[in-house]
Amino acid sequence: MQVTSEEIQVIAKLVYDLCGVILDQTKGYLIESRLSSVAQEVGCQTFSELYYKARYDHEKALQTKIVDAITTQETLFFRDDSPFEALQHKAIPEMVDSKAKTAFPKRLRIWSAACSTGQEPYSIGMILSELIPDIHSWDINILATDISDTAIKLASRGSYMAHEIQRGMKPAMLDKYFIQEGTTYRIKDEIRALVSFQQRNLHKPFIGLGPFDIVFCRNVAIYFNPADKKSLFNRIADAMVPEGYLFVGFAESLMDVGTNFVPQHHCRSVFYQPNTNKAALV
């Protein structure tokens, strides 16, 4: 099914209203590749029909299918390596040390925003388990959220095919933290218990979220317009502890979103921390 220039405009508006993802005239191929099967499944012969059915028939299930199809992104365990090295060798050790001086020395709150099918939060959980010998005496929660209900359901199962598990996974981690069940691998309960999953739209207010010690919000803001990107990271700043750590995507930068965060460099990675002196920079 081919999409016309006019259809790109209306589908782009629909997608933005549903999930905030920005599509322009160069994304016709993406609309065709990801939404053609959705259109055919619901009996639409054109993308215009799909638009009107989703927009005016108020079919929540169809809107969910469109969001799922558009927002499904590539993911793998320990993606890009260096952020997880910085997490292991910098963020977690320093956070554990700083927690020792507080009223809750064994409490950690981590947010994996846009977690897709769960590889990121489970990678974080494995690193925590490696670093904290008595981890199950700690009060730890890794909140994993995504806009896609389908992704959240898959993530919560913690079960992956061999080709999914082997990409980015270190053999020692696979042997230690997964159970092979036929052609699939299931994350062990000790790691699964660290993670809770919720469906969340990052454009909506973060009611009831935080404060977080560490936030991973990687490879999602690249699909936002500048105003929405700035709003997202300002709200994340408000949901973090003052000494927290924020990890974004390899190709992302927060230099254009204001003074809420200061970049830090470690293990070939750039991460950000809340700027406690931002008033002096205004």
Image (cartoon, rainbow, N blue to C red):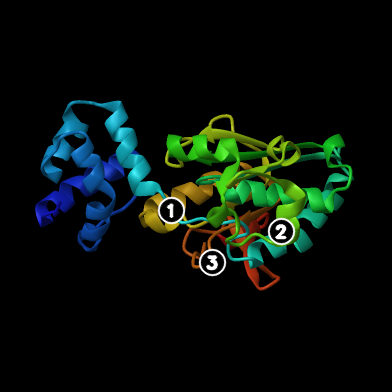
186 and 218: which is toward the camera: 186
Residue nearest the viewer, comparing 99 with 220: 220
Amino acid type shown at disc 3:
Phe
Identify the mark nearer the N-term, 1 or 3: 1
Q: Is residue 67 left or right of residue 192?
A: left
Which element type, helix, strand or loop, lies under badge 1?
loop
Mark 2 falls on what kind of element? helix
Left or right: 34 as drawn, with respect to 238: left
Q: Which residue is mark 3?
A: 250
| Amino acid at pointer 2 | Leu
**Percent position of residue 212, x then y:** 67, 42
Q: Residue at x 54, y 56 (%)?
A: 163
Residue 103 can be seen in this image: no
Q: Dot 3: within a 10 Å radius of its alpha carbon, few (fewer than 14), some, or many (20 or more) residues? A: some
Q: Which mark is residue 73?
A: 1
Who is closer to the viewer here, 98 or 148? Answer: 148
Residue at x 54% of width, y 46% of height:
115
> Which residue is rendered at x = 25% and y = 41% of the image?
38
Whether residue 53 is visible here, answered yes or no, is yes
Q: Residue at x 13, y 54 (%)?
A: 2
**Dot 1, crowdedness within 10 Å: few (<14), some or many (≥20)?**
some
The nearer-to-camera label among 1 and 2 is 1
Disc 3 vs disc 2: Cβ atoms closer than 8 Å?
no
Q: Quadrant of the C terminus?
A: bottom right
The CA distance from mark 1 to mark 3 is 15 Å
Q: Is residue 194 left or right of residue 5?
A: right
Write down the residue under mark 2: 87
Question: Is the residue marked by circle 2 packed among few (<14), some (14-19), or many (20+) residues within 10 Å?
Answer: many
